[in-house]
Amino acid sequence: MSVELTLNIPESDDPRIVIIGAGFAGLTLARKLKNKAFQVVLIDRNNFHQFQPLFYQVAMAGLEPSSISFPLRKTFQGVKNVYIRIAELESVQTENKLICTSQGNLKYDYLVVATGAVTNYFGNKDIEDKSFGLKTVGEALHLRNKVLTDFEQSLHIQNYEDRQSLIDIVIVGGGPTGVELAGSLAEMRKYILPKDYRELDSEEVDIYLIQGGENLLMGMEDKLGQAAVDYLRKMGVKVMLNTRVTEIHDRHIVTNTGEEIVAGKVIWAAGVVCEKIDGIQDSAVKRGNRLAVNAYNELIGEEHVFVLGDAAVMISDELPYGHPQVAQPAIQQAKNLAKNFIRSGGDVSKKSTWKSFKYKDYGTMATVGRNKALVQLPKTSFKGFFAWLTWLLVHLYALVGVKNRLLVLLNWCWNYFTYDQSLRIILRPKTKKGQESRET
């Protein structure tokens, strides 16, 4: 007997706002609209919100995934106007005000696309298949398993070249994710490997950070990018600028200069791209599959569709490529849209009551390691211990849930004072009874 799939949302006299994606933008909008005169349907492929800036710490065994993830239903307990559904968006029919998902179709009065972005492999399927991304908690756990498994396996290998292919790591992309990963790996090599893997010479572990541009952290001031280079090189990371990875093989990579580097693990952090959405007019799709919006985050050419965060591009003379694809624009756009909906009762014809979006740049930051970070504010910049402390406080504040903040703070304090990480556990999902899958 076949079962008809449906999202099973009750009818309501209130305007129905369907939000696709529970990232920073989608979750913020839903929270701002709770207990208001709207029926809010929040749809995501996961039943939790993920705090992406700390994925690298999960991958490096510094944090448990549960401490940077927050259950959506916990957020909206007792909230009667918010409905949560776990489903994948398949297409949009704007002419019928209908979305099609993996669990059924749903009519909307207003649709908000907040689907975020995924790793950009620049169309190279081979690189996509042979490298590790870091855009989900699942990918972070998979990378953690692979790193730890390869360290374990290296203890059985006598041949030097064979061992290097297991323990050497290449990171591609010199943005905040790449820099933070490289710094975390360098600290693991210095503080953890000599204690956990005494038979392994930690000096054999080579960490490469490959950047296509002429400096790291290209969105920051040049002096901060150079400071990141200096920090990492002092920590033993081999920073390669003006270099691109063109091929990835099982035991080595090839760069655009023809150089071959032995490494069995490549972490790809070289940019992001948005997933295409069937049913959206091609004229609204811009570079990186971002969707063009007006000053109210309304999709160009559509009155009842809005786009927030990474998926949105609001082009202006000051920002010809739109806002940066980071958390703050997403959060601020969601807050502004929520206020506009509330002002007009969801009636987009009452645009006179709406306020256009104005981005307030609070700055950019990245941490390199213990007591080392870089902070760029609108009027000043700084580095070192105070920047590192600022980075810690900002990320703690941004986490969802008091429990998560306490767990992360406890882990950070433990790591800082003991020079250790307590989460180096290899987890393998079972494939069948009595047999576990092998990490490859």
Image (cartoon, rainbow, N blue to C red):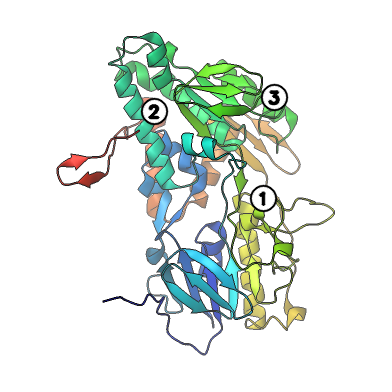
Quarter the C terminus occupies: top left
Residue 221 image offset from top left, x and y in percent = 74, 33
Q: Disc 3 on helix, strand or loop?
A: loop
Q: Nearer the viewer, residue 247 or 243?
A: 247
> What amino acid does circle 3 point to?
Asn
- Mark 1 and mark 2: span between their CA atoms? 42 Å
> What amino acid does circle 1 point to?
Gly
- Mark earlier in primary sequence (1, 2): 1
- Mark earlier in primary sequence (2, 3): 3
Q: Nearer the viewer, residue 211 or 215?
A: 211
Q: Residue at x 53, y 35 (%)?
A: 127
Side of 431 where 270 appears, left or right: right
Of all residues, the one furthest to the bottom in this rendering is 13
Of all residues, the one furthest to the left in this rendering is 434
Density class for disc 1 (Cα within 10 Å; few <14, some 14-19, many ≥20) is: some
Q: Which residue is mark 2?
A: 417
Quarter the N terminus occupies: bottom left
Residue 41 image offset from top left, x and y in percent = 48, 74
Side of 338 where 190 appears, left or right: left
Density class for disc 2 (Cα within 10 Å; few <14, some 14-19, many ≥20) is: few
Q: Disc 1 on helix, strand or loop?
A: helix
Residue 78 sits in quarter: bottom left
Q: Is residue 425 above or below residue 290?
A: above
Q: Which residue is mark 3?
A: 242
Side of 267 where 409 appears, left or right: left
